[in-house]
Amino acid sequence: MLNKLNPWKTQNKASSLNERILQVKSQEPPSHIAIIMDGNGRWAQKRSLPRIAGHHEGMKVVRKITKLASQLGVKTLTVYAFSTENWKRPKREVDFLMKLPEEFLGTYLPELVEENVKVTMMGYKDKLPPHTQRAVEKAMKDTKDNTGLTLNFALNYGSRAEILDAVKDVLNDCNKGTLEVGELDEETFSSYLMTSSLPDPDLLIRTSGEIRLSNFMLWQLAYSEFWFTDVLWPDFSEEHFVEAIEVFQSRQRRFGGV
Ligand code: FPP
């Protein structure tokens, strides 16, 4: 938006974001970024709005950040949209959160298709309301051959449940004789997780000042870089996203080595 009082400031800010984008692009951006989008409720509360208004605003931010991630050449963006624990919230809020994927995909799917984005989902899909399942399945079907950014929704996702289910599947395969215990290594175990087709996240972003993982990708985040910000998710901007990547690029990843 043009700052009428200080157009130079606005222009300078805009061009510096573009410069930062170019810089980040030239230095190998993280391949997989995972985001815990926290603070929607507080954002709404601060404005005396119902919590769902914060989620709705947060949905628009997902669109904005998807576009930028795509532009930056990020391969996968995983967004934590609903956890297996979020069912404990008031029914009105849960119902609203279950309608958001429909609204998001109903509004933005044509643009996502145009931008070559592939939509995927991880989580317990069968336990979602049928209307939510239909919206996600349609988006996955319409974008399955796209080769650009993968936008991966963590919906009704919980990492401990995911790991337990993987352990059960491993035991079943061992009992059936299709897997030898001795064959089980980290790579094989990863293939039993919901992220079997995805690389581990390089960078985790969590907004709203909370410094915890909240049952999110516990196995997959073992070697990821973490970036936390006090900014509430609905206020999260392109500048914040670029800043997170700049910090990531300034860090030295050693994966346990020296
Ligand atoms: C946590 O904030 C956020 C969630 C539980 C929902 C996240 C959902 C979105 C950002 C909407 C995007 C969804 C789609 C389908 C594009 P909180 O409600 O716990 O915030 P609080 O800690 O301030 O109460």
Image (cartoon, rainbow, N blue to C red):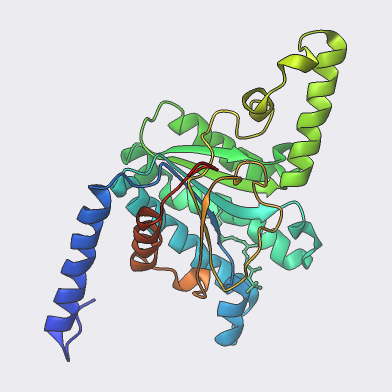
Depth order, front residue of 97/15: 15
Q: How many marks?
A: 0
Horizontal side of 87 relative to 57 (left or right) equals: right
Residue 149 against residue 79 in the figure, above or below: above
| Closer to the camera in the image, 202 or 58 | 202
Report ligand 1 position as a quadrant.
bottom right
Q: Quadrant of the N terminus?
A: bottom left
**Residue with the most extreme bottom position:** 5
Location of residue 23 (image quadrant): bottom left
x and y percentages locating residue 12 in the rendered image: 15, 75
Residue 250 position (above or below residue 156)? below
Across and down, in percent, residue 103 comes to 53, 54
Q: Residue 137: horizontal and vertical position, in percent? A: 58, 35
Q: Residue pushed farthest front? A: 258
Question: Is residue 59 or residue 247 the one in the foreground?
Answer: 247
Q: Name, please, the residue furthest toward the right.
A: 175
Q: In the image, what residue occupies the spot 38% across and 59% down?
A: 64
Q: Quadrant of residue 90?
A: bottom right
The residue sitting at 84% across, 22% down in the picture is 171
On screen, residue 172 above or below 246: above
Q: Position of residue 247 (x, y in %)?
A: 38, 61
Q: Residue at x 49, y 39 (%)?
A: 119
- Residue drawn at x 35%, y 57% is 250
Q: Is residue 242 above or below residue 50?
A: above
Left or right? Give the position of 26 relative to 224.
Answer: left
Is 252 on the left-hand or right-hand side of 154?
left
Residue at the far left: name it.
8
